[in-house]
Image (cartoon, grey):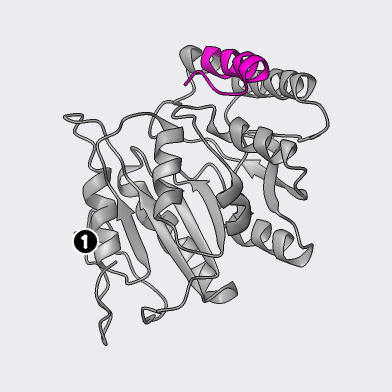
Amino acid sequence: MVDTQKEHECLKKSSTEGQFSFSRNPDEKETTPGISVVILAYRSGEGIYPFVESIVRSLEENEPDWEIILVGNYFSGDGDPTPSIVSKIAQSHPRIRSVTRIKEGMMGWDMKSGLEAATGRTLAVIDGDGQMPFEDVIHVYRKLKNEGLDMAKTFRTQRGDGLYRKTISVAYNIIFNILFPGLNCRDINSKPKIMTREVYNRMDLHSNGWFIDAEIMIQAGKRNLKIGEIPTVFHQINYRPSFVQLGSVWEFFMNLLWYRLFNRPII
């Protein structure tokens, strides 16, 4: 976390990049944040600028005691500009920190590295590609706080990513609820997911891959946590192809079977 400055300076960018700004000049606090928002920014590039700015403004209006962890982990030599971008954003704001490490896994590894860096009493995780609306962080957070839940999340009622992804998701959730009955979760992989610090400390997450969302929900079910869900809309992205390819789908289903048999993920 950067040192507190009396005059907070916005991060200036070229005219082709736009301008990254904040609505006010927050002071760095010594107290534990009420909420830590972990944003998974892998290969988000310049698109992470408006997403972070929107979340910052939403947090300032609704939960002024916050921090953001930007996870920009990368594969060596892949030319991804995201690590440099999230580091610049973190340098511009005392309540934003970046995690930029050479990757040793996929989404699960990134998520765990972000959660480990978070210090808040409540922990939120959301993808930074814009498919999940930034407003959902506050909506899910209110659900958790107002109803005294252990965990809260979204479920996708509308999807802009096509019939293929929707079909896979429906099949995956049906199989999940067959293999792990009792949780009755409508959308295992949907984010943001928000949990209390106590819940996170009780979890023992191992997945370094795409299975991390399911592992969280399996462990939540085994611990009989109070879980709430709210509906959301899943947007389409056009600036990059989906990371969920055939290999990822195979990984999802094999991990479900492996976890059911051996109580741990393959990846």
Looking at the image, residue 24 lies above or below residue 123:
below
Of the residues shown, which amino acid type is indicated by label 1? Lys
Identify the residue at horizontal 50%, vertical 27% (top origin). Answer: 210
Question: Residue 141, percent across and down?
Answer: 65, 61
- Determine the secondary structure under disc 1: loop
On whether residue 257 falls in the magenta region, the answer is yes
Q: Residue at x 75, y 19 (%)?
A: 179
Is residue 12 on the magenta stretch?
no
- In which quadrant of the rendered view does residue 77 lie? top left
Say which quarter of the image contains residue 96. Answer: bottom left
- For disc 1, the neighbor class at 10 Å (few under 14, some 14 to 19, many from 20) is few
Q: Position of residue 175 (x, y in %)?
A: 73, 18
Q: Where is residue 159 drawn, in percent x and y?
A: 64, 34
Q: Which of the 4 image quadrants contains residue 117? A: bottom left
Quadrant containing the N terminus in the rendered view: bottom left
- When the figure is inspected, residue 25 is found, relative to residue 239, above or below; the finding is below
Does 3 sit left or right of 135 as displayed?
A: left
One can see residue 238 in this view = no
Taking depth in this image into account, of 132 and 194 the one nearest to the observer is: 194
Type of secondary structure dominating the magenta stretch: helix
Give, as a single range, the part of the protein colored magenta: 250-267
Task: Using the rendered image of the protein, determine whether residue 13 is visible from the camera's viewpoint.
Answer: yes
- Can you identify the residue that label 1 sits on? 13
Where does the image place residue 259, in percent across and percent down from the top left?
Answer: 62, 20
Q: Is residue 129 above or below residue 122?
A: above
